Amino acid sequence: MNQTNRYTESDCSLDEFASLLERDARPKLTFASHIQRGIPLYDCGALAPALDDSSTCMALQAEWATVLRDGAGVFVLKHAYADVDPIDEAAAIFESIIRQERERGASAADHFAKAGANDRIWNAQEKLCLHAPRVFARYFANRFIECAALAWLGPGFQMTSQVNVVRPGGDAQQAHRDYHLGFQTADEVRRYPAHVHAISPYLTLKGAVAHSDMPVESGPTKLLPFSQRYAQGYLAWRRADFREYFEAHHVQLPLEKGDALFFSPALFHAAGANRTRDVQRMANLLQVSSAYGRAMETLDRARMCESVYPVLLDFKSTESMSDAEIDAVIAACAEGYAFPTNLDRDPPIGGLAPKSQQALLRQALDETWSVDALANALKDNAWRRNT
């Protein structure tokens, strides 16, 4: 890393990456039933009593946190749903939502796949709750899911989910890391200090609940154990040589309906290709966020943008404020982050994330929009974000 405390692609070394992954630094595991291809598997039937004993439960959570931070970066909960009836009931609701959204002509743009290549339900969490609250309650009464979220994020976490269905013939994704920094462009990632690269994985837990049996041929998630430990990984995964290494060394584990998979968002991973003729691979992708990813106050930033815009137009036209100074004003005024948003209305078309309010305000200034044009664009932006 250079003296700017910022990572660049030149800081990424495939040899160092490979050495880190091959290093034997696997933590001692007390609760895992066995290790498969470097990934710990947990028998939820045997672990169920541990959830009712406070000290044992905390020890289990400590082990899971260690796995996510220092170990494989991923673990599997076998038979997290001993009773799969809630899985089947939720799957039926999800399929009906997919049909309804298709009939409306909705196209669920994807972060890492072509729109329409898979069936995806954005905000499946809210949709399931509103469509079938009884099913929702039975589905999320699962204590193993709650226990895993608490292990990594602590209390007050925010649960969201997106359903992904990959039909026979569905293509694989490219290797990547996930939200937060994984959803930024390389240019944006380079702007963040190195310590933010270290912090980002601690703000999110990734999970997936298998809604169907997933033999390896159906393309369950490809995983690269221990890759979450590579500090420069948010830039490295975009390089062809790292992606080639991933394809040569990744691991895929078959899953059964009712299994759950949890992993660090910094783990290199990718959905696999569905090479079967008859398996409809459905997973409910859990995106669990830390309670601490919030500001102290709520501000009407759209109103602030409307108020300051004529001033910035004037300063820009008269050159009485530099572009750098204008950028500083925009940063203090407009929302700089595209998330959270309503991904049905505001999908990541043409990139990993929708356009932020800051980007909208910069565009208005660059193109000299009228005040009314900006006001209308901000209203549309708020509607898309459902704010």
Image (cartoon, rainbow, N blue to C red):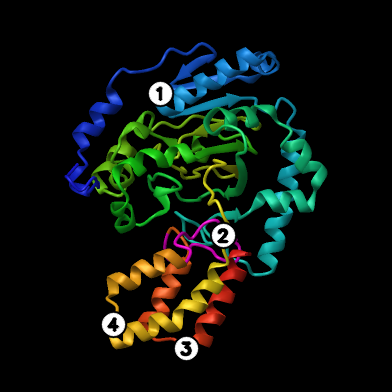
Nearest to the observer: residue 42 or residue 331: 331
Pointer 1 with pointer 3, Cβ within 8 A = no
Q: Which mark is residue 370?
A: 3
Taking 206 as reference, is 303 above or below it? Answer: below
| Residue depicted at 77% across the width and 53% down the height | 130
Q: Earlier in the sequence, mark 1 or mark 3?
A: 1
Q: Secondary structure at mark 2?
A: loop
Query: Where does label 2 land, which residue?
Result: 341
**From mark 4 to mark 2, how far is it between C-alphas?**
35 Å
Which segment is the magenta one?
A: 334-351
Query: Where does label 1 land, which residue?
Result: 71
Nearest to the observer: residue 207 or residue 82: 207
The three-letter code of the residue at mark 4 reads Ser
| Mark 1 residue crowding within 10 angstroms, few (<14) / some (14–19) / many (20+) | many
| Mark 3 residue crowding within 10 angstroms, few (<14) / some (14–19) / many (20+) | some
Q: Which mark is residue 379?
A: none
Nearest to the observer: residue 230 or residue 313: 313
Query: Where does label 4 land, which residue?
Result: 320
The three-letter code of the residue at mark 3 reads Ser
- Residue 339 among magenta residues: yes
